[in-house]
Amino acid sequence: MDKAAFLSNIAARLGRAPGSAPAARDAIGVPDFWADCQTSHEERVATFCARFEALAGEVIRCEDEARLHAVLDETLQAVRPRAVGAWGKDAPWPVNVEEILAKWGARRFGEQSVLDIDVGITGATCGIADTGTLVIATGGAAGRTVHQVPLVHLVVMRESQVVQSLGDAIPHVRLAAPGELAPFVHFISGPSRSSDIENDQTIGVHGPARVICLLLQDGAGGA
C-alpha cells in the first residue's frame, strides 16, 4: 500500500476527507461526573487500601505514631534484613521514624551507599484511591535508589495524604521550593511485576517484590 492510500484509509476510518483538519472536540479532559466525584476521607482511604492490596501491595493501618513505630520495628524483625536503607534526614518524611531507623542502623541516602540494601524505607507524596497507587516524588535527600534497589520497600504515610484521583495528586508533586517540580516522580501500584517472558508473570524483577505501606490514621476528615 502506498502512502496516499494508507493515509486515505486512516482518514476514512476517522470519518473525514484525506488532508482535512481534525474536527473540533466538544470536551477536553475527563467527564464531569468523574472530575466532580466527591467522596469522604474514610471512603478514599478504604478504596486506596482495597485497590493497593488487590495489586499485591500490603497496607497496615496504624492508629497513632507509637503503633506505627512498633509495626515498622516488627516488620523489620520479620524480614531480618542484612542492611536497611532510608531517605536522608532532610527528606520530606510525613512521619518521624528516626528512632526506628537509628535502632536498625539504616544507611541514609546521600550519606552512605544504599546499593546493597535488603529493605528500603521511604515516605510518600500521596496515595491515589482510584488506582491504588503510591506517588513518590524524589530528589535531594529523597533518593529514588532507596525504593528501587531492595527486595522490600516500606512506606510510611498519613491517611490525610490519600487523594481521589491522579488529577488530585499532580499539585502535590513538588519539592520544598514553591513551584519546583521534582526531578523524578514514581507511581507504584504494588510490587514490581513483569510478564515479558512467555506471559509468565514474575514478581520482583524490576524492583521490590514486596511493598508495604504503613498508614497513619491522623484523623483527617471531610470530602
Image: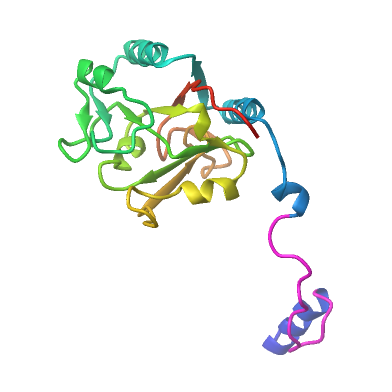
One can see residue 145 in this view: yes
> Magenta span: helix, strand or loop, mainly?
loop
Q: Is residue 108 magenta?
A: no
The image shows a total of numbered marks equal to 0
In percent of width and height, residue 43 lies at: 67, 28
- Camera-nearest residue between 58 and 37: 37
Give the farthest residue toward the left.
111
Q: How is the image coloured?
A: rainbow
One can see residue 133 in this view: no
Is 130 rendered above or below residue 158?
A: below
Q: Is residue 27 magenta?
A: yes
Q: Is residue 126 left or right of residue 2?
A: left
Q: Quadrant of residue 124?
A: top left
Is 101 rendered above or below residue 113?
A: above
In percent of width and height, residue 97 lies at: 31, 22
In percent of width and height, residue 38 lies at: 71, 39
Q: Is residue 127 left or right of residue 4?
A: left
Q: Quadrant of residue 132?
A: top right
At 35% across and 15% down in the image, what residue appears?
A: 69
Give the farthest residue toward the front.
222
Q: Is residue 136 left or right of residue 132?
A: left
In percent of width and height, residue 134 lies at: 49, 37
The residue range painted magenta reads: 14-30
Is 121 rendered above or below residue 76?
A: below
Is 219 rendered above or below residue 206?
A: above
* The C terminus sits in image quarter: top right
Q: Is residue 153 left or right of residue 12?
A: left
* The N terminus sits in image quarter: bottom right
At 39% across and 57% down in the image, what residue appears?
A: 179
- Camera-nearest residue between 7 and 180: 180
